[in-house]
Image: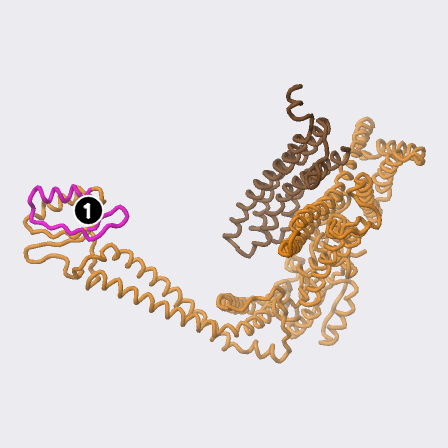
């Protein structure tokens, strides 16, 4: 099926040709190297684990320099980033030139570093200066020079502050005791009053006692000269000077922004080399040779031999089938249209090599369910046109590309289902439905949705049967799936009069078979039968699964009726010309909003139907994705 | 009782309004709470990594649907009794039925939106720590929403059965 068959390749070649071989293997991109170290114990003394740690370390150090510079310059890049970045093309000579240009990298890195550290320095001195201003501000009104505060021959002057509520207490005490002291209130800030106290040295003892009582906090400005105001102005000038320096530094950094292109390319080139050298640690070596082992898709095995022939004739290679205990990496090979849906499955779990790849079965249901849940022809056109344009114009990569394709197919499906059920911007454009209108015949719609559900679930059971047969358990498929499906089908036929008679026998055979065989591993005959009877209860589980598909109808209903609500609200505005303009603007916005809402709901609920109802029936997952040594880039074309 | 019925002019219209109010009101409350809960967690994630805004916004939007479902049933009730055009006469019995129509979507909407909000908030943790598992994080809140969807369906089928 769609899981690619893998071979295990084991190769021995010369150390001297290792780099060349690896270089080509990386470009070839279909070999996933596995670690050989644990196999060494099997008795060859002269075998050693191979490694290229020194080179990898050097590359990592360089990469971190490049990354730092890219990030740093990114902060100064004022150009708007495009939503879908294009990858640049770099030819071979340029690649070599860039890799060899170590000086340029060093230069850029060093200047980034120096600018960055200057910024940090400036920031810390700015904080210091701002603190000084905050400290000086309450003293703004003080006209004395700060260096003159202190001791003279007979007097002392000190600065400090107390809580404003003790202010009176202090001044009355000074007055009442007739101390030779002078209090000057300089300012008030928050809950504190700031004072300069001048007193004769004879009353020093009493003054300090008084001050202690009112909670005096002494302030000294030993490092300043001049009045507080002069100082504040000087500091402000310093700060604005720093601002200018910062601007100049930013300009310097901005001037280097064009170098980002060089850095990005270098980043990719170094990463490629690092990837290549990192795999060496999985090899084992002797003095002159090395040995590697890896997984390769069967169909590429010949290509690999050809590739090696092109380099040297001094090698041996063998391809063998995977053994039972091997953990085989999984590579999927689906048609192009199904590829994007692999993402949905991978979100749940990657298929494993012994199970089956569900994507090709899941994708059609996904498209259909998605469409039914949105069900509006115009919304569908909108979605497909938008995503189609983005795909054509910007060529997004990776997850974004898959998402766009899923939306694109979803849009087409939405268009068809919209036509079938007569949804064209809700009821704004009156088009006769190709089939019927679910709002008029809800029961018909509900039954239709449940039938789709039954088909989906049956597909799941059949896939489980296939899986059993593939694993050689032919009888399991009969006992567990065929009998079960007979029972379910029979029960459903009972509801349809012309088929009721057939249905009765099918249900009886199915039920009897299930009772007898479902617990066949049980030795005790009574226990076995009781477990069998209990297994019949799964019918109610099946019923629950089927009813879960009523969400198809409910979400289709939601999109349609919300659109109608918006239309009704919009049309109420459409009186005058201005009203009409507002109406059109409102309707445009409302329908785009409803599309977004519908798409989100459809995506989430379709995924849920796949994960819970469908995958629950057969899917195992938990595989390891195939991760070959290949050229991986972020900025440049591969 | 006789007096009350006389007072109402022998019309069930007010009950129909009550039904639509329950549907739109309760479900709306639920969504408001749910979206709020998810938003708080989402804001926490953004303080660490602002680039995750889009993903957290999606998660926050998930418990918002109940309010819309409630409004939807409210709207269908209004259009049935002709609020947007000429009012249709509604008997007491019909009015009562229309009131009950609002209950499933209103009640289930209220409760499920709150719990969906909590599930969304927990999924924000997935986005913070393992952003690559975002898809799984969307499914947990969606499991809760199932019941809101079913209640919407229940309300709709009930409404559809009422002939005025």
Percent position of residue A533, x then y: 81, 29
Numbered disc 1: secondary structure = loop
For image coordinates 59% across by 38% down, the residue present is: B29
Furthest residue in direction front, as rendered: A576
Of residues A476 and A160, the one nearer the viewer is A160
Furthest residue in direction top, as rendered: B2
In the image, is residue A186 part of the stretch drawn in magenta?
yes
Residue B80 location, quadrant? top right
Which chain contains the residue that carries disc 1?
A
For image coordinates 19% across by 53% down, the residue present is: A186
Quarter holding the C terminus of chain A? bottom right
For image coordinates 16% across by 45% down, the residue present is: A211
Q: Circle 1 sits on which residue?
A: A216
Percent position of residue A360, x then y: 79, 54
Query: How many neighbours does mark 1 have within 10 angstroms: few (below 14), some (14-19), or many (20 or more)?
Result: some
Residue A331 visible, this orientation? no
Q: Magenta residues?
A: A166-194
Position of A365 relative to A296 (above/below): above
Residue A162 visible, this orientation? yes
Chain B rendering hue: brown
Colour scheme = by chain
Of residues A630 and A583, the one nearer the viewer is A583
Q: Is residue B52 left or right of residue A239?
A: right
Chain A rendering hue: orange
Residue A130 location, quadrant? bottom left
Quarter holding the N terminus of chain A? bottom right
Of residues A525 and A93, the one nearer the viewer is A93
Percent position of residue B94, x then y: 73, 29
In the image, is residue A119 part of the stretch drawn in magenta?
no
- Count of labels shown? 1
Percent position of residue A546, x then y: 78, 39
């Amino acid at each position: 099926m769609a899981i690619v068959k893998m071979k295990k390749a084991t190769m021995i070649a010369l150390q001297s040709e290792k780099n060349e071989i690896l270089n080509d293997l990386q470009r070839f991109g279909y070999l996933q190297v596995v670690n050989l170290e644990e196999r060494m114990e099997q008795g060859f003394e002269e075998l050693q684990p191979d490694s290229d740690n020194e080179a990898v370390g050097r590359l990592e150090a360089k990469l971190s320099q490049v990354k730092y510079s890219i990030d740093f310059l990114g902060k100064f890049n004022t150009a708007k980033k495009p939503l879908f970045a294009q990858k640049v093309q770099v030819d071979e000579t340029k690649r070599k030139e860039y890799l060899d240009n170590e000086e340029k990298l060093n230069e850029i890195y060093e200047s980034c570093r120096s600018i960055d550290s200057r910024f940090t320095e400036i920031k810390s001195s700015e904080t210091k200066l701002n603190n000084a201003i905050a400290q000086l501000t309450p003293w703004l009104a003080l006209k004395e020079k700060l260096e003159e505060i202190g001791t003279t021959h007979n007097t002392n002057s000190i600065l400090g502050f107390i809580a404003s509520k003790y202010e009176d207490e202090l001044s009355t005490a000074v007055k009442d005791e007739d101390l030779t002291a002078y209090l000057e209130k300089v300012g008030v800030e928050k809950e504190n009053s700031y004072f300069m106290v001048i007193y004769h040295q004879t009353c020093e003892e009493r003054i300090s006692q008084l001050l202690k009582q009112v909670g005096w906090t002494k302030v000294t400005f030993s490092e300043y000269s001049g009045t507080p105001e002069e100082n504040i102005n000087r500091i402000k000038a310093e700060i604005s000077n720093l601002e200018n320096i910062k601007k100049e530094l930013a300009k310097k950094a901005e001037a280097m922004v064009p170098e980002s292109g060089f850095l990005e390319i270098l980043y990719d080139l170094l990463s490629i080399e690092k990837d290549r050298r990192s795999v060496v640690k999985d090899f084992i070596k002797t003095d002159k040779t090395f040995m590697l082992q890896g997984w390769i898709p069967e169909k590429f095995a010949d290509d690999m031999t050809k590739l090696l022939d092109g380099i040297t004739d001094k090698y041996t290679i063998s391809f063998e089938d995977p053994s039972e205990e091997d953990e085989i990496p999984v590579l999927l090979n689906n048609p192009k249209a199904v590829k994007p849906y692999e993402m949905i499955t991978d979100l749940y779990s990657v298929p494993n090599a012994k199970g089956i790849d569900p994507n090709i079965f899941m994708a059609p249901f996904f498209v259909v369910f998605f469409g039914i849940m949105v069900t509006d022809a115009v919304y569908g056109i909108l979605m497909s046109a938008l995503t189609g344009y983005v795909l054509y114009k910007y060529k997004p990569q990776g997850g974004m590309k898959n998402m766009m394709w899923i939306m694109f197919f979803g849009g087409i499906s939405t268009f068809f289902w919209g036509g079938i059920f007569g949804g064209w911007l809700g009821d704004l454009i009156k088009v006769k439905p190709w089939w019927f209108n679910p709002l008029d015949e809800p029961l018909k719609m509900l039954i239709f949705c449940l039938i789709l559900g039954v088909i989906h679930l049956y597909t799941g059971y059949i896939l489980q049967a296939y899986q059993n047969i593939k694993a050689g358990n032919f009888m399991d498929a009969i006992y567990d799936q065929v009998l079960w499906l007979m029972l379910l089908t029979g029960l459903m036929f009972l509801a349809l009069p012309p088929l009721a008679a057939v249905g009765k026998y099918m249900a009886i055979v199915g039920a009897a078979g299930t009772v007898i065989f479902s617990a066949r591993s049980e030795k005790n005959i009574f226990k076995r039968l009781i477990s069998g009877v209990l297994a019949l209860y799964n019918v109610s589980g099946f019923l629950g699964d089927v009813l879960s598909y009523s969400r198809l109808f409910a979400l289709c209903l939601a999109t349609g009726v919300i659109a109608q609500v918006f239309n009704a609200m919009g049309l109420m505005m459409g009186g005058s010309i201005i009203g009409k303009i507002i109406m059109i603007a409102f309707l445009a916005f409302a329908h785009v909003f409803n599309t977004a809402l519908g798409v989100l709901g459809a995506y989430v609920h379709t995924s849920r139907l796949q994960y819970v109802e469908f995958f629950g029936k057969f899917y195992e997952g938990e595989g390891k994705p195939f991760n070959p040594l290949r050229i991986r880039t972020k900025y440049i074309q591969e | 009782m006789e007096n009350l019925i006389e007072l109402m002019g022998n019309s069930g219209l007010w009950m129909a309004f009550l039904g639509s109010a329950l549907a739109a009101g309760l479900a709306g409350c639920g969504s408001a709470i749910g979206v709020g809960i998810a938003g708080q967690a989402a804001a926490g994630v953004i303080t660490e990594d602002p680039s995750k805004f889009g993903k957290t916004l999606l998660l926050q939007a998930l418990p918002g649907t109940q309010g819309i479902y409630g409004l939807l049933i409210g709207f269908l009730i209004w259009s049935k009794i002709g609020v947007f055009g000429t009012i249709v006469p509604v008997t007491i019995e019909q009015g009562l039925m229309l009131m009950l129509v609002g209950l499933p979507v209103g009640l289930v909407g209220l409760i499920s939106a709150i719990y969906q909000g909590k599930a969304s908030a927990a999924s924000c943790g997935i986005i913070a720590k393992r952003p690559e598992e975002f898809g799984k994080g969307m499914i947990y809140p969606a499991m809760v929403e199932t019941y809101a969807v079913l209640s919407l369906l229940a309300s709709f089928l009930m409404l559809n059965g009422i002939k005025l």
